[in-house]
Image (tube, rainbow, N blue to C red):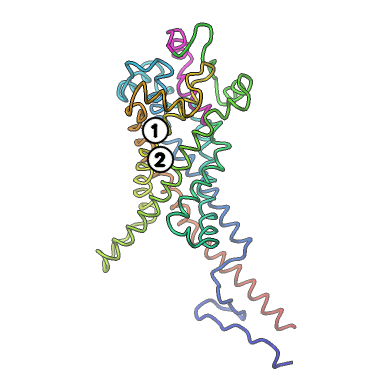
Amino acid sequence: MAASKPSPPPRVAGAGAGTGYWSPAPRSPSPNLTNFFVWREFVWGAIAGAFGEGMMHPVDTLKTRLQSQAIITGAKAQKNIFQMIRTVWVSDGLKGFYRGISPGVTGSLATGATYFGVIESTKTWLENSNPNLSGHWSHFIAGGIGDTLGSFIYVPCEVMKQRMQVQGTRKSWASTATKGSISQTPGAPMYQYYNGMFHAGCSIWRDHGLKGLYAGYWSTLARDVPFAGLMVTFYEAMKELTEYGKRKYLPESNLHASNSFEGLLLGGLAGGCSAYLTTPLDVIKTRLQVQGSTISYNGWLDAITKTWANEGMSGLFKGSIPRIIWYVPASAFTFMAVEFLRDHFKEKTDSDARELTGLSMDTRSEVEEAA
């Protein structure tokens, strides 16, 4: 009997007090505990996404208005960013810059949660199941998957947000609708004025059904999947490059930057680069979602063709400056918030993991001794 009894696993020096034994991998929490920690990523991502959107919504309003000018007022004599700032301020005041913030924050809650939550769980699964997809490829795919899942909530919110941003105040929208724009036929206004997010959603559903709420869905995915993949890939690559630079050029330096500061700096750079590269896709998405009842473009390819024919390359990169201005700080604030929340709860998380793992090991040891 004694010979057949398996020998207990060795203790790990310094692992902790008590009569129990630690497993060979004491740092691996139980699946339930791991799932709990992954769910925290969803919460942190949601908070960070809403924070970034709330901070930078006025810049997003400028970007939307710049990109939609070809539909609202025609392709000729379009305003630049400084002229648009003055136009919004004179016609709508400060509240004009914050039109559509409710659906904007709601959509960012969803996409932030899925983006960061899915990244943490998916990239690990990809690396373990297929080593060929490790590194930057796993980051790109995980970012794309996370953004795709969030799009089911994000796209309807984006449609409502952008139409409210274009409208401004009730007075300015009524003035725009009576100017006889080339994109509006007499007696057929683009859409009515929306009093708020709920009114916008109900009105779009009544007039266009589910198709209206998901207008430009595929163009949104065509923009956001590459953007999401590029942003997390750039971010992780910059983090690796920073660590390499520290080891090579400052091997004995005591200089240390917090993860929050790195998230602020590297997240902003990653967001800005990704935003510029995907601006043409954003222009097409915005015009498809804003056009409303008066159809200017019959799909994604038609929008690209007409934009290129009428406005050239500059039309495809319309609004690139405010888009970069929006994404640099928004991405910076988002990654900073996520890194801060991770650092803030990391010590408690590790403590909980050790406590629960130690408790399970002690319990198992007692059972073995009783047997």
Nearer to us: label 1 or label 2? 1
Residue 139 percent location from the top left of the image: 46, 53
Residue drawn at 34 percent across, 48 percent down: 265
Closer to the camera in the image, 47 or 281: 281
Do labels 1 and 2 touch, CB within 8 Å? no
- Corner quadrant of residue 250: bottom left
Q: Tell me the tag on residue 313.
A: none
The reply, left or right, for residue 156 in relation to residue 364 is left
| Span highlighted in magenta in the image | 158-182
Residue 133 percent location from the top left of the image: 48, 58
Residue 145 percent location from the top left of the image: 53, 47
Residue to which mark 2 is pinned: 330
Whole-number angstrom distance, CA of label 1 to CA of label 2: 20 Å
The reply, left or right, for residue 90 in relation to residue 33 is left
Residue 347 percent location from the top left of the image: 49, 62
Q: Amino acid at mark 1?
A: Pro
Closer to the camera in the image, 46 or 187: 187
Residue to which mark 1 is pinned: 280
Quarter of the figure that contains the N terminus: bottom right
Extreme residue in the left direction? 249
Closer to the camera in the image, 369 or 175: 175
